[in-house]
Structures are given as structure tokens and as C-alpha cells.
Image (cartoon, helix red, strand yellow):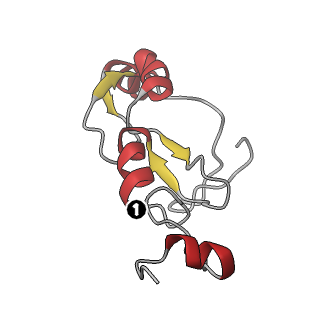
Amino acid sequence: MCGDICPSCRSKMSDAKSLLAVTVVENIDHKCGNFGCAEEFPLTELKAHMNICSFMLIMCPISFCEENVAFCNLVEHLTVKCPYNSVQKPIPIPVTGFLQQRFSDDPT
């Protein structure tokens, strides 16, 4: 950053940090960055929370699904929303030949 020019006043900027700004940032609560989470933490605790937050995004474990889902919504995604979940939406298998005769509703 040293050597950069301020876009407002065009004066040279340095790497110096405002002690007041650093103190404020370190001592205020910060919102969790995961969508849906309303938790707030001091800066020193935020990273630990982000690693265990139930709203952290994880990739769907179904191999063809590339959707990122909040951990707390994974069960709903797998049972209701995932387009590749064969348990939720069985893949239709045509029944022909012997199987058609064996499992047909027609008694003849």
C-alpha cells in the first residue's frame, strides 16, 4: 500500500494504521458471514464460530449435484430439493419381458 495515492486528495498514502480504528475493529462484535446466521462475535471468536456455524455452506454429497447448501438445511435438500437424489425421485426403469409378466397386475 505504501506509495499509493489517495483517490480523493491525491496525496501519498503510507502503511500506517489508525490505532483508533484498529481498537474499534477489535472490540466490536462482528456478524457471522454465513447467510442465515444472525450470530455476532468479537473478532477473536469469529473464526472459531465460522468453523462450526450450522449455516456454513457445504457441497451436496450426491456426486452429480454441485449445489452448496447450508449445513442446517442439508437433510431438507437431500430429501426434498436435490434433483439427483434417487431415493426422493426413483429413476424409472422400464419393466419388460419376464419381469413384466411376473409383476403385472393382470392375472393372465
Amino acid at pointer 1: Lys
Of residues 10 and 23, the one drawn nearer to the viewer in this rendering: 23
How many numbered discs, if any?
1
Tell me: 38 left or right of 90: left
Of residues 92 and 43, the one drawn nearer to the viewer in this rendering: 92
In which image quadrant can residue 40 be found? top left
The correct choice, above or below, for 17 with respect to 4 in the image is above
Where in the figure is residue 43, as x and y percent of width and height?
41, 22
Where in the figure is residue 63, as x and y percent of width and height?
67, 54
Q: Is mark 1 on a helix, strand or loop?
A: helix
Q: Mark 1 points at which residue?
A: 81
Where in the figure is residue 59, as x and y percent of width and height?
58, 48
In the rendered image, the quadrant that contains the N terminus is: top right
Instruction: Identify which residue is drawn at 30% across, 46% down.
Output: 36
Tell me: 26 left or right of 90: left
Q: Residue furthest right?
A: 3
Q: Residues within 10 Å of mark 1 (few under 14, many from 20)?
A: few
Where in the figure is residue 23, as x and y percent of width and height?
39, 19
Instruction: Identify which residue is drawn at 33% across, 18% down.
Output: 27
The correct choice, above or below, for 35 with respect to 97 in the image is above
The correct choice, above or below, for 1 with respect to 41 in the image is below
Q: Which residue lies furthest to the left in this view?
A: 38
Instruction: Identify which residue is drawn at 47% across, 61% down.
Output: 82
Of residues 47 and 42, the one drawn nearer to the viewer in this rendering: 47
Q: Which residue lies furthest to the front in this view?
A: 108
Of residues 107 and 32, the one drawn nearer to the viewer in this rendering: 107
In which image quadrant can residue 17 be found? top right
Tell me: 103 left or right of 5: left
